[in-house]
Amino acid sequence: MNQEYEMVIGLEVHCELKTQSKIFCACPTSFGAQPNTHCCPVCLGMPGALPSLNREAVRLAARAGIALNCEIHTHSQMDRKNYFYPDMPKAYQITQFTYPLCTCGWLEIEGEDGKKRIGITRIHIEEDAGKMIHTPHGSLIDYNRCGVPLIEIVSEPDLRSAQEAKAYVQKLRSILTAAGVSDCKMQEGSLRVDVNLSVRKKGDLSLGVRTEMKNLNSVQFMGKAIEFEAQRQVGVLESGAAVFQETRRYNEETGRTEIMRRKEEAEDYRYFPDPDLQVVYLSREEIEQIAGEMPQLPDERLCYYQEKYGLPAQDAGLLSQNLSVSRCFEQAACHSKYPKIAANILIANWLPFFDFSGEEEFPQLWEQLSSLADLFGDARLNSGTVKNLAVRIWKTGEDPKTIAQRENLWQIQDEAALLPIIQNVLAECPRAVQDYHCGRQQALGPLMGQVIRRTSGRADPQIVRRLLIEILARNGEKENLGG
Ligand code: ADP
Ligand code: MG
Ligand code: ZN
């Protein structure tokens, strides 16, 4: 992007709450059922049907607010947001407008230059709409999702790049899944992101005109949409024209954003308090109780891993941000004599294969991991073998001991067995030996490599190294005496 400009981004994240039933009726919330089978007069908006608020949704929303350092209000209000579109059969959505449940929070991301706090303006409770499916023969509608409880998390315009926006969404997912508030599956639509973006000349204090982008169903696409839209706005401004406040859609095929509609204003929605619902009341005691029941959050886990296992901050960070990764590590750590080794094996050999932005679970290979860590810690396997085995176990889930036994991979530490091999290698590599005697320490590397290769990778590298140094020193003395 043109270096004179900077992006300003604020995100609105919709997130489905993990309740059993919908927010105003008893219909189930589970995903993937036959269309229009999870519906009743309330969520279909039949005349005369009355909503009754699911308290579990309120508690989960409060839990999200507490996890995101918000102020939780004892009194909040459900409002009607009026609009006509077939995804909402009542012709209004029940949401919170004037008095949301949570305000003034923040979360911390790794920004471009270190840690950065991103403000959270508000979190409000609302109901989801139905899902439209557009086909060449017409549009179809599935109301199973209609009335599923949501929270909308609105950030301050504090993000300055696609990278920061991605880090924010990932951190949000990691906090909300750990808090047990939501599954946060972008592909299934249980987490959806709208991006508000404007650009301005660096140093400007006022904000530029923003556009809002919808239809972003992965973190990668969101990043691409942001890059494209920022470029587009800079182009518009540089040509002397103005950016319009509008809603745009990201087209995954073209990689471009396209206009959907000019942005609607709050007055278009004629918000007013829903007369069918009372003020939402949460006592201070209940808020305290929800806070007290909070599961461990990723950043707490990070500190815990540093203290309990002596892991460096960066490693602790890698192991604490995804719930399924943490689960695998913790299980391995408490079953192994060497938790730190287990951490290193997991980070070096398995994490590179795992997509943090994706939705798959990290494989729970903790039994294999703890056993591999013990075999290495107890010097039964050397580091090269552990690396090979780790990669194989990732693919097959096999037990390391079984493979090592079957293929005889046990480390050789017996000096009597290693000595003749070392003597042979020294006799066959006079160049390397000479280099070493001339003071080139690096010559040790290829010599060690040769010895280890001749034991099919099983020699203990530390013992080989020590023996090599001893023998070379002895030979060196002999030469000096002889000469
Ligand atoms: P709405 O989209 O309903 O009009 P808001 O006006 O509160 O709601 O803004 C929604 C989001 O847009 C917030 O995340 C906010 O940080 C962000 N935002 C507001 N103004 C700008 C701007 N000029 N540039 C970028 N983001 C903005
Ligand atoms: Mg908006
Ligand atoms: Zn229903």
Image (cartoon, rainbow, N blue to C red):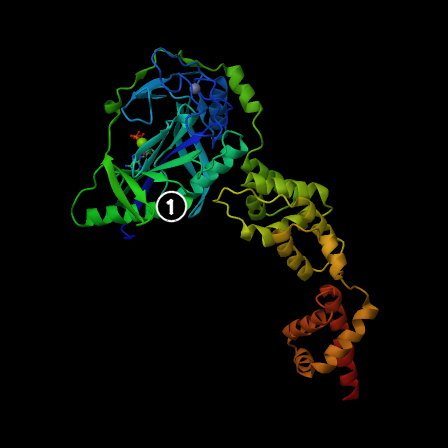
How many marks overall? 1
Residue 29 percent across, percent down from the top left = 47, 26
Residue drawn 39% across the image and 40% down it: 217
Q: Judge whether residue 88 can be spotted in this image.
A: yes
Task: List the residue tagged with mark 1.
Answer: 221
In the displayed structure, would residue 188 be above or below residue 438? above
- Outermost residue on the bottom side: it is 483
Q: Pick whichever, 94 or 152, lies toward us.
A: 94
**Picture layout, residue 168 above or below residue 349:** above
* Viewer-closest of 383 and 26: 26
Residue 401 image position (x, y, % from top left): 74, 53
Extreme residue toward the right, this view: 416
Give the crowd class for mark 1: few <14, some 14-19, many >=20 residues within 10 Å: some
- 124 relative to 257, above or below: above
Horizontal side of 147 relative to 459 (left or right) equals: left
Residue at 63 percent across and 48 percent down: it is: 343
- The amino acid beneath tag 1 is Phe
Q: Quarter of the image containing the C terminus?
A: bottom right
Residue sticking out furthest to the front: 137
Residue situated in front as seen by the camera: 435 or 74: 74
Q: Locate ligand 1 by image quadrant.
A: top left
